[in-house]
Amino acid sequence: MAIVTDYLKNEETYPLFLDGDSLDILKSFPDESVDCCITSPPYWGKRQYENGGIGLEKKYTEYIDNLLAIISEVRRVLKPSGAFWLNIGDSYKNKNLLGIPWRVALRMMDDGWHLRNDVIWYKHKGGLSPSKDRFGSVYEDFFFFVKSDKYYFDADAIRTKPREAKVQNGAVVSATGVSGIRYKRQIELSTDLNENEKENAMNALNAVLERISNGEISDFRMVIRNVQRTTHSDSEKVSGRAKELKEKGFYFLFYNPKGTMPSDVWDIIPEDSQKRSEHYAPYPEELCVYPIKATCPPDGVVLDPFSGTGTTAKVAYDLGRKSIGIDMSKVYNELALNRICRK
């Protein structure tokens, strides 16, 4: 498709929307031509969208097969450094939760995808549950896949700003209130450290406090033999920290001075669907921010093969990235264009 090739060469970041079936359109894309794919396909048996499409199959197994055929094309058009973010909800049949998200994810892993995270999208407010014999559903899976073990990821772009260390009553205090006084007392009173180990531990602790005072680091934790619980494992075979603790009697854990990484649980309120008459998915803009900042280079291209009203494309445009959206509905693509043009 010449229009796709021309767009990829163009430096303009305005989104490109294509009308038609995702599988057919993706087959016309050049190999390894996009940097990141973020999408939320229609869930099985949930809604009737304009022009039909995937999600209306009689059997959920057919739905999974059809979805994986499209995902296979996504894998082909992704660059080796590319990432694929898949938001997908589950469905019930005959009182059984079908486990569709994980059925899809496991099939993808068998096909060669690397699953880096299952991010839990906690939606705060779920719809009123009509069921009287099960709990309400307030989360969805948001899978983070990559094509290879060497992929683009800009961690610094999504870190939260760290709190700063300070001097309090003449003592250096870390961002979370660690002054070192307690650690010094624990070293002095330890019956598990010999005198040489105590001296080394005290010198190392003073050096760390000096680094905090100089602004090189903002926070730390100290683990002292038989005082604090070791991290991860006590076995030296599986933990380098355990080996360090045995040989030295202590070790440090340092926090990144640029801030902390987001966790794999994201509290994001669904988009308000009550004010939209043409499209009903709750897929919110905020859900796309971390993925685009972290896994799409500033000059990269974001793909959404189920673009709906253009949420992915809008966020990509706001963040200065190019994007391509595909949807069977020309009406939805027009809504997406109008949504972004309103800016």
Image (cartoon, rainbow, N blue to C red):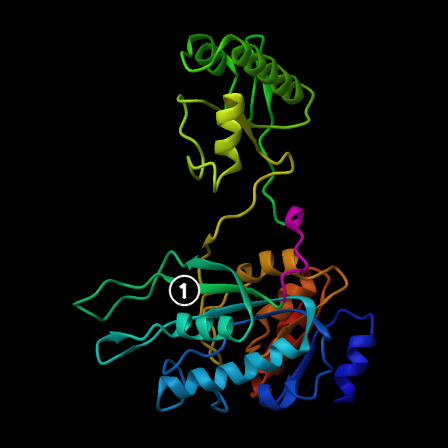
Q: Is residue 44 above or below residue 84?
A: below
Identify which residue is drawn at 52% across, 17% down: 179
Element type where label 1 sits in the image: strand
Left or right: where does residue 98 sit relative to residue 237? Answer: left
Residue located farthest toward the left when viewing the structure as drawn: 133
Could you say which is closer to the camera, residue 234 or residue 141?
A: 234
Residue 137 x %, y %: 31, 64
Q: Quick one: label 1, few (<14), some, or many (20+) residues within 10 Å?
A: some
* Residue 65 visible: yes
Residue 149 magenta: yes
Instruction: Specify the quadrant of the image occupied by residue 5.
Output: bottom right
Q: Is residue 247 magenta?
A: no
Q: Going 57% across and 41% down the picture, which residue do you hit?
A: 260
Residue at 31% over, 75% down: 98
Q: Is residue 114 above or below residue 238?
A: below
Q: Is residue 55 visible?
A: no
Q: Is the magenta stretch mostly helix, strand or loop?
A: loop
Magenta span covers which residues?
Answer: 148-157
Q: In which quarter of the image is residue 34?
A: bottom right
Give the labeled residue for mark 1: 140
Q: In which quarter of the image is residue 200?
A: top right
Quadrant into which the N terminus falls: bottom right
Please state which amino acid type lies under the numbered disc 1.
Glu
Q: Where is residue 184 in the image (x, y as percent from the top left)?
A: 50, 12
Indicate left or right for 74 with 64 as reference: right
